[in-house]
Structures are given as structure tokens and as C-alpha cells.
Image: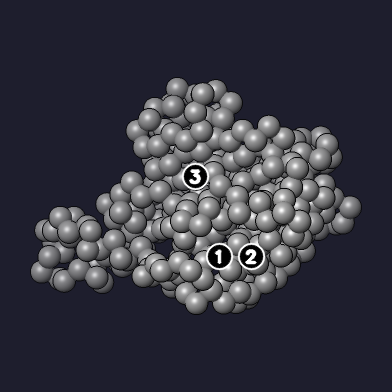
Amino acid sequence: MIIVTSEYGDVGLPAAMQDLHDGGSALDAVETGTRIVESNPEDHTVGFSGLPNLLGEVELDASLMDGRTLRAGAVGSLRGYEHAISVARKVMEELPHVLIVGEGAARFATEMGFEKRNLLTPEADRIWRERLEAEVPAERRGELRYREKMRELARLAVDPELASETVNFLALDRHGDIASAVSTSGWAWKYPGRLGDSPIIGAGGYADNRYGAAACTGRGEMAICLGTARSVIVYMKMGMSVEEACVEAMNDFEALQDPYAGGISIRAIDRDGRPAGASNREDRFLWYWQDDVDGPAKLPLVYVDTGH
Ligand code: ASP
């Protein structure tokens, strides 16, 4: 049994591992770990207290996948519900669909009995406002006229220094079942309605018991264009090790001519639970926790220069 998570997912690791110890499934464990990150008020990039879009609205994206059945559920641009990952799971379990967005996602969350919550905290609001005000000339601020020119301001969302950090969870349970989960408030100051890779199955996350699981953080547009999470799985299917597969998926970005391209990281496990990852930024790592050891350990992601 193993749980893997991204840099800021460590707060959810103990509860996720407890789930596996208690006989919970990989799917239960990735959901449990993700929910804790979604509730963490210190984390401004996932769930409650996430940074908002250009209009000041927090919009959440999340997906999860069951590697045993290859079924998946996802929500995008979900407003007003903290646990996007649990709504995504309900999409998988209750609807004949995979991805529900915007008002439909909120309607479905209400229908499933999820509690509504204002996700914008005063601190996240302050961070959002200060940056917008720094970018908008003083004479325009009072009128909030920047709202008319949102397209010009959407470039705020691609400043690599302000890159947010989505959370990834991958798990292998005692039955050999594998699952993936991804949750995020996406890029702050994004154009309203923008979906990143997190709710796109095959881009931000993928799980298949036969080969393993993979998930991404970073500039989601890149992972969407290259189908990154599914690529890692296919490279493993073709015989690569989990580390080789992550590096190969990272190499795929070399051909990408994206004027906004930035950092992107992949974390993965193979079907035996071996973890690995790769990133085009240095000093990135993943957390992994194997059930037979007392606590989590860090594993550096292989650095790959993609030219971005
Ligand atoms: N991948 C996420 C997105 O593009 C952002 C992130 O990982 O920080 O929405």
C-alpha cells in the first residue's frame, strides 16, 4: 500500500494512510487526503480560501479516477462548495457523465446535499485585490473598469512566480486497486470559466490498475495540450519504468510552442506502487508513504529541461 501526494498535500497524508490501514479503498484514501487539503485555510490554491478568478470568485476544479473500473468523475468552475473532490466522486457514482461544470456542478452539489460555503477568505481577497490594484492604473480603480477589459488582464494568471499549487493524491490499496485525485482553485486571476488540467481526465490525472497512476501540477494548459497524465500511463504500458515514463511525458513538452508556458510537474506510481516524478522546474519533490514505514518520505522529481 502506498500514498503519494504533491508538496502541499502532506497535511492530508496521515488521514489517507489511516483509511488504507482501516481497509478503505484507494479511492477512499485519495478523497480523504484531498478533502483535508481543501479545508486547509493556509492553502490558497485548493478549496476553501483558494485565490479567485479575475472577478473575485473562487472557482474550483477537481477530478478523481478509479483504476479498477476506469471510471472517473470531475467538476469544473464549481462555486460555493468546499469539497470539489467529493462532488467529483458523486458525479462518477451518480451520473451517466464524467465532467460537470459551472452552474450545473453547483446545482448537482446542492442536489447531493453538499453544504454551501463562502470560499473567499479575507486574506485571499486581500491578495487578489492587491495584485489587481497594482496592475490597474489608479484612476481606473474606483470605477472597477478593469472588469470591462478582463481579456487584457488574463495574462496575470500566467505569471510563473504566482503559480498556484494544485494537490495530487495517488494511492495503491491492499487489493492492488489504484486511484488518482486532483483538486485546485486553478490559477488565480484566471479568466472566469477557465478550466485547467485538473478536471480533465487524461491531462491532470489518470489511474489504471494495469499500469499505474499519474497526476500533474503547474500550468494546466500544457498538460491539456499533451494529454500528460494518460501519456505517462501509456509509456508504462509500452514497457518504460515509472520514472522513464514521467521523463518521456516531460520530454513531450519540448515541441510545445506556448507563449505562456511555465512550470509543470508530474507525479506517478506504477502498478506495484513504485513512485517517481519529473518536473521542468528544479527542486520539486513528492511525498510518499508506504504502509510498512512509520511516516512519509520525500522523493525529488527528476529535473527535465523542456525549454520553457
Ligand atoms: N494545474 C493547475 C491548473 O492549471 C494549477 C496548479 O497546478 O497549480 O489549474
User: In whole angstroms, how far apart are the C-alphas of marks 1 and 3?
Assistant: 21 Å
User: In whole angstroms, how far apart are the C-alphas of marks 2 and 1?
Assistant: 6 Å
Q: Earlier in the sequence, mark 1 or mark 3?
A: 3
Callout 1: helix, strand or loop? Answer: helix
Q: Nearer the viewer, residue 126 or 61?
A: 61
Q: Are marks 2 and 1 in contact (CB under 8 Å)?
A: yes
Judging by the rendered image, the residue that carries numbered circle 1 is 252
Judging by the rendered image, the residue that carries numbered circle 3 is 199
Q: Amino acid at mark 3?
A: Pro
Judging by the rendered image, the residue that carries numbered circle 2 is 248
Q: Nearer the viewer, mark 1 or mark 3?
A: 1
Q: Is residue 6 left or right of residue 120?
A: right
Tag on residue 172?
Answer: none
Q: Nearer the viewer, residue 31 or 94?
A: 94
Q: Amino acid at mark 1?
A: Asp
User: In whole angstroms, how far apart are the C-alphas of marks 3 and 2?
Assistant: 23 Å
Callout 2: helix, strand or loop? Answer: helix
Is residue 168 something that shows in the picture? no
